[in-house]
Image (cartoon, rainbow, N blue to C red):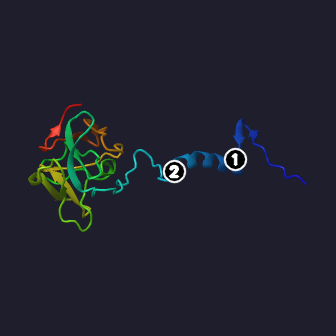
Amino acid sequence: MTRRVPKPHRRGGIIRRTPVAVAAVVLFLVLPASACTSSGTAVTAPFSTSPPTLEHNPVYEVMARSVSGLGPLLVDGQGLTLYMFTTDQRGSPSRCYDICAVQWPSLTLAKGSVSPLAGPGIETRLLGTAPRSDGTTQITYNGWPLYLWPPDRSPGKATGQALTNAGGRWYVVDPAGNPVQQH
C-alpha cells in the first residue's frame, strides 16, 4: 500500500501547508545560520554580543596597533579595535547601559583580575578602571571608558569609527589617549 502525502491546497486564495512542509522550510532557513566552517568553528551572526574568545593574550590587555589606515590605535588583547563614546565624560564612569551596552560591550576586567594589562605601545599611567553598575570593572584609557564594536570581528577593522549610535558619537582612541575624529 502506498502512503499518500497530502499536497498543499488553496482555500480562499491562501495556500495551506502541511506540518511537514512547514518544518522543511524552517530547517532550510535555520540550518545555514548554525553552520560550521571547515575548521569546525561555529559561524555566528555579525552582531553577536558574545565576547571574543581568548586565543593568546587576555582580552583585558590594551595595546597599540595600526588599524585601517587610521594609524596606531588602541586594541584589546585579541587585536580588536577599542572605542570611546562622546556621551561619556572623561574621568567618569560609563554612561553606556541597557541597549547601548548590548550594541557596544564595555571592555572589562576578567573576574579575579585587579588591573588591566598594558601591552606594547601603551602608556601605563593612562590605563585605569571605572566601576559599572552591574558590578563589573570597565577598563579606561586617559579617563575614557573603552568599548568594543561587535561588527569588528577581526583585528585591523574599525567599522565603528565616527559612527553616530546609541545617543552619541564613537571614535577610536590613539596611544596618547585622544579620540581620533577623522572619518
Residue for badge 2:
36
Residue at left 19%, top 53%? 119
In depth, the one of 35 and 5 nearer the eye is 35
Q: Residues within 10 Å of mark 1 (few under 14, many from 20)?
A: few
Task: Return the residue nearer the eye: 19 or 152.
Answer: 152
Residue at (85, 52) in percent of width and height? 3
- In the displayed structure image, the side of residue 25 where residue 8 appears, left or right: right
**Left or right: 55, with 174 as reference point:** right
- Residue extending furthest toward the top: 183
Earlier along the polypeptide chain: callout 1 or callout 2?
A: 1
Q: Quadrant of residue 176?
A: top left
- Residue where numbered disc 1 is placed: 21
Image depth: mark 1 or mark 2 in front: 2
Specify whether 20 is left or right of 152: right
Give the CA distance from mark 1 to mark 2. Answer: 25 Å
Q: Quadrant of residue 54?
A: bottom left
As drawn, the residue found furthest toward the left would be 125
Give x and y (percent) for residue 103. 33, 47
Instruction: Pinpoint residue 136: horizontal percent, then vertical percent.
Output: 24, 62
At mark 2, the secondary structure is loop
Mark 2 packing: few (<14 Cα in 10 Å), some, or many (20+)? few
Helix, strand or loop at label 1? It is helix
Q: Quadrant of the C terminus?
A: top left
| Type of amino acid under label 2 | Cys
Q: Tell me the kind of residue under disc 1.
A: Ala
Q: Position of residue 87 (x, y in %)?
A: 19, 44
Q: For this rendering, which residue is in front, 121 or 134?
A: 121
Q: Residue at x 35, y 46 (%)?
A: 150
Residue 84, can we see it? no
**Residue in front for this viewpoint, 31 or 120:** 120
In the figure, is residue 9 to the left or right of 159?
right
Residue 5 is tagged as none
